[in-house]
C-alpha cells in the first residue's frame, strides 16, 4: 500500500505536467519553458500556487493575480492520473509492467483531454507513445495471439521477445489500418472528413501497448461510447449535427483505459 501511495503522489506530479502538455502541445508551445503561467493574465505562477490539487483548493479555484477561474480540468487531470497510478501499482507493485501501464495511462489521460478541449491529438503523445509501446513490448510481454498464429502458419514460429514485438507491431498496424480505411471510405461516400488522422495514430499507439485483441476491443467500445454519448449530447444541447465535431479520440482513449485496466493486464499477466 505504501508503494501504491507513493505512485499516487507521483501521479499527481505527472498529472500536473500533463496539464501543461494539454494546454501547450496543441498550440505548438514548449512544455519546458517558460515556467507555468496563467493562460488568462500570463503572470508566472509561484511554486506554492502550483501544488497539484492543494493550490486549486487554497486559491478557491481562482488565479491569485487576475482572479479568473482556473478550469476544472486542472484538478481533474491531476486526480485522475493519481488514481490510475495508484490502482496500477496497488495491483502490480513496483515493476516494469506497472511502469508500462502507468505510462500508457498518462498518455491516454493527456490525449483524452487534448482532444476534448482542442480536438487535437498531439504527435508527441501519439507517435511518441507508439515508439515507447513498441520498445516496451521487448521487455514487457504483449500477450500472444494473432501474430503467434500467423507466424506458425507461415512456418516461422517465434518465441519470447521477438514474438512479443511481433504482437505489438500487429496490434499497432491492424486496428489503426482498419480505422484509416473506414475514414477514407466515409470521405469517399460523404465527401467530408469523418475522422482525423490523429485518431488513427492514437490507435496505433494503443495497439503497440496492448496487442491486437485488446485494441480491437478498444475500437468497438470506443465507437459505441462515441455514438451513444455523442448522440445524447447533441440531442440535449441541440448542437447542429452537421457541424459538431465529436472528440472521437476522447472516447477511444477512455475505452483504452477501461480495456487496459480491466482486461488480462489487470491480473498482471
Ligand atoms: Zn491570471
Image (cartoon, rainbow, N blue to C red):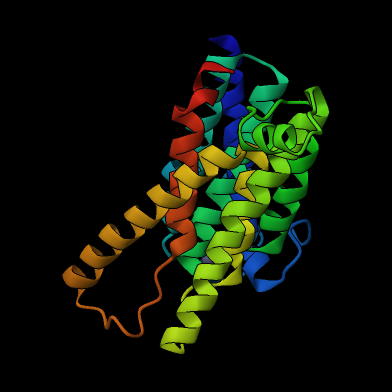
Q: Position of residue 265 (x, y in %)?
A: 55, 25
Q: Is 236 positioned to the left or the right of 106 in the image? A: left
**In the image, residue 13 lies at what x, y percent?**
63, 37
Quadrant of image for the C terminus: top right
Q: As drawn, is 103 to the left or to the right of 251?
A: right
Question: Quadrant of residue 23 in the image?
Answer: bottom right
Quadrant in the rendering for residue 170: top right
Q: How many marks?
A: 0
Q: Residue at x 43, y 65 (%)?
A: 247
Residue positioned 70% across, 40% down in the render: 168
Q: Is residue 92 visible?
A: yes
266 or 95, which lies in front? 266
148 to the left or right of 87? right
In this rendering, the answer to whether 126 lies above or below 83 is: below
Residue 254 to residue 250: above or below:
above
Which residue is more in the foreground, 212 or 8? 212
Q: Nearer the viewer, residue 87 or 224?
A: 224
- Can you give x and y, in whole percent of width and height, for residue 108 in the image? 56, 47
Identify the residue shown where x is 66% and y is 49%.
Answer: 172
Residue that appears at 46% across and 57% down: 250
Residue 52, image quadrant? top right
Residue at the extreme top:
1
46 or 230, which is in the foreground? 230
**Residue 61 seen from this side:** no
Amino acid at each position: 500500500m505504501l508503494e501504491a501511495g507513493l505512485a499516487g503522489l507521483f501521479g499527481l506530479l505527472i498529472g500536473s505536467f500533463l496539464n501543461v502538455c494539454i494546454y501547450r502541445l496543441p498550440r505548438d508551445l514548449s512544455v519546458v519553458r517558460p515556467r507555468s503561467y496563467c493562460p488568462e493574465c500570463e503572470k508566472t505562477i509561484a511554486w506554492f500556487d502550483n501544488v497539484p490539487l492543494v493550490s486549486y483548493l487554497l486559491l478557491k479555484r481562482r488565479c491569485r493575480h487576475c482572479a479568473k477561474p482556473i478550469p476544472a480540468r486542472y484538478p481533474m487531470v491531476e486526480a485522475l492520473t493519481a488514481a490510475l497510478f495508484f490502482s496500477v501499482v496497488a495491483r502490480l507493485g513496483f515493476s516494469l509492467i506497472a511502469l508500462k501501464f502507468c505510462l500508457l495511462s498518462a498518455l491516454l489521460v493527456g490525449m483524452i483531454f487534448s482532444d476534448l478541449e482542442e480536438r487535437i491529438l498531439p504527435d508527441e503523445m501519439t507517435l511518441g507513445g507508439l515508439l515507447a509501446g513498441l520498445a516496451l513490448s521487448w521487455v514487457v510481454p504483449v500477450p500472444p495471439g494473432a501474430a503467434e498464429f500467423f507466424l506458425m502458419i507461415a512456418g516461422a514460429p517465434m518465441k519470447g521477445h521477438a514474438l512479443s514485438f511481433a504482437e505489438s507491431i500487429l496490434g499497432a498496424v491492424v486496428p489503426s489500418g482498419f480505422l484509416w480505411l473506414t475514414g477514407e471510405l466515409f470521405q469517399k461516400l460523404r465527401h467530408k472528413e469523418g475522422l482525423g488522422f490523429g485518431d488513427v495514430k492514437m490507435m496505433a499507439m494503443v495497439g503497440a501497448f496492448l496487442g491486437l485483441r485488446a485494441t480491437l476491443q478498444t475500437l468497438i467500445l470506443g465507437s459505441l461510447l462515441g455514438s451513444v454519448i455523442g448522440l445524447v449530447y447533441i440531442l440535449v444541447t441541440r448542437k447542429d449535427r452537421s457541424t459538431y465535431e465529436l472528440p472521437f479520440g476522447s472516447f477511444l482513449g477512455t475505452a483504452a483505459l477501461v480495456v487496459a485496466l480491466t482486461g488480462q493486464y489487470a491480473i498482471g499477466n
